[in-house]
Amino acid sequence: MSVRKLTLQEWFLRYQLKDIQKNHFNLPIWLSINVTRLTLLFTSKGQRVPYNSLIIKTIGLMAARHPEVNRMHYRGLFSLRVIEFQQISVNLPILYEFEEQKVLSATSVRDPHQVSWKEIQKKLPKRKT
């Protein structure tokens, strides 16, 4: 893990995002993903599509390919700093159902880009059948 000062571009981006947050400005994004092929693949085998595992795996692969998303900005004692993590950790809120009660759990998986989606699925709490 390395800690460094922000570049001018990073500082300006942080300034813009803080201004957007302060003024309650919303940047709407509509993300459309076609999962037809995934659904057909899993249903042809009589299985449910493991969306949570696939999302975690995809985010891990993206972070491995684009390390700039695996950073954290924070205010140090005298200036803004950036921590660049060497390990990829994907955190995702997942809604589980246990004994007729729904529970929102913050799930964290380390280095999902290095394991298969099946191994990620084993790390997640078992869902009610």
Image (cartoon, rainbow, N blue to C red):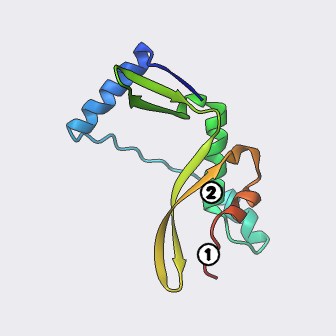
Q: Check the image and report above or below for 80 versus 45.
A: above
Element assignment for label 2: loop
Foreground of the two, 85 or 11: 85
Element assignment for label 1: loop
On screen, residue 66 versus residue 45, left or right, reads left
> Which disc is residue 35 wearing?
2
**Is there CB contact under 8 Å for labels 1 and 2?**
no
- The residue that mark 1 highlights is 127
Q: Check the image and report above or below for 17 versus 4.
A: below
Numbered disc total: 2
Amino acid type at circle 1 is Arg
Q: Check the image and report above or below for 39 versus 74.
A: below
The residue under the point 54% across, 51% down is: 91
The residue under the point 75% across, 58% down is: 119
Looking at marks 1 and 2 on the same chain, the residue that comes earlier in the sequence is marked by: 2
On screen, residue 38 versus residue 128, left or right, reads right
Q: Residues within 10 Å of mark 1 (few under 14, many from 20)?
A: few
On screen, residue 49 versus residue 9, left or right, reads right
Q: Where is residue 77 shown, x and y percent of the image?
A: 35, 24
Amino acid type at circle 2 is Val
Question: Farthest residue toward the top?
Answer: 8
> Which disc is residue 51 wearing?
none
The residue under the point 51% across, 29% down is: 83
The residue under the point 62% across, 69% down is: 125
Q: Where is residue 73 shown, x and y percent of the image?
A: 43, 30
Write down the quadrant of residue 81 in the picture.
Answer: top left
Q: Where is residue 68 shown, x and y percent of the image?
A: 55, 28
Q: Assign the C terminus to one quadrant of the image.
A: bottom right
On screen, residue 62 versus residue 80, left or right, reads right
